Image: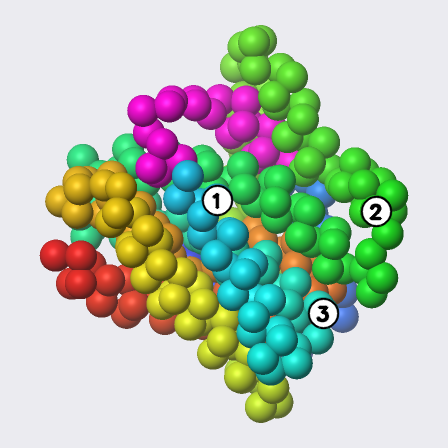
Amino acid sequence: MHGLALIAVCLLIGVGLARSERLPDNFCAVLNLFAVRVALPALVLKHIHAIVFDATLWLPLLTPWVVFALSAAAAQLAGRFWGLRRDTIGCLTLVCGTGNTSIVGIPLVQAFIGVPAVGYAVVIDQSNFVVMCTLGMVAASLYSEDRPDGQRIVRQMLGYRPLQMLVLALLLRPIEFPMWLDQTLSVLGATLTPIALISVGASLHWPRELGVVRNFLVGACIKLLMVPALVLLLWSQVSDLRDLAFTTSVLQAAMPPMIIAGLIATERRLDPPLTQVLIGVGIPLSFLTTGLWLVLLH
């Protein structure tokens, strides 16, 4: 459960630094820049290069794609019902469409279900990472423009470092990375989570605007309640309810928003106040909701 401790410690460090009143104004912006331009590309290159695609694991592999599609549809419906701004809809699509299936998901799956489920949890995490690097990047580019222009969006995506590393990782799959490169990528990639969480903690505050509170409640309901319920209903039609892959897939679908997606949303100015609350409050809130899902699954 060291991943959960890391989350708590880094968030508290960020909150403490913010209260010290000694931080430069661009502190969080610099952290986010390093995370998105250095740490995230290293992580993408390492993990996508090593990912194993196995057709027998279709349920865990498909779960993150279904989660993103359902979240995107829910964000659109919420946007129409409440008249949400375009950047808010983009935030809900990107941040709620990808889950924290690694540092939160894997430890919780191991604690709730047991070691045999960890393998499925890792497969879901890898597929979730691919979703973030593909559909997530498309959504970030699409919603960051007031009037989306197809050519401009394509240029933005092609110039985005993590997506470049995704393509490079796929092209280099036949080639084994030397140990020094693999270790270098591991070290750089390992800085992503603490840096991102410290940035979230330093910029976290409970919003006073009723609109942001409402949007947070909408996003939390989408990510932690509605989408897992739909995944449960959908997968129950094609899988044995007692199957370990089924249980793990539903539980991973109920994980809080992905930290990396929050960084990208902040960089693309997709409602940063909402993004920060969804990440900072969504993670501890998910400890309660995932427990409720576990009770329901059993």
Left or right: 58, with 190 as reference point = left
Task: From this view, report whether residue 146 is shown above or below residue 54.
Answer: below
Q: What is the three-letter code of the residue carrying label 3?
A: Arg
Reply yes or no: does residue 95 show up in magenta: no
Q: Amino acid at mark 2?
A: Gly
Q: Residue at x 29, y 55 (%)?
A: 232
Instruction: Please say whether residue 89 is visible from this viewpoint.
Output: yes
Give the residue type at disc 1: Trp
Instruction: Quickly name the residue at label 3.
Output: 86
Q: Are marks 3 and 1 in contact (CB under 8 Å)?
A: no
Q: Main secondary structure of the magenta part?
A: helix
Image marks 2 and 3: residues in contact by CB distance under 8 Å? no
Answer left or right for 150 relative to 236.
Answer: right
Reply above or below: 27 against 67: below
**For the residue carrying disc 1, how many other residues have a C-alpha within 10 Å: few (<14), some (14-19), or many (20+)?**
many
Disc 2 target residue: 150
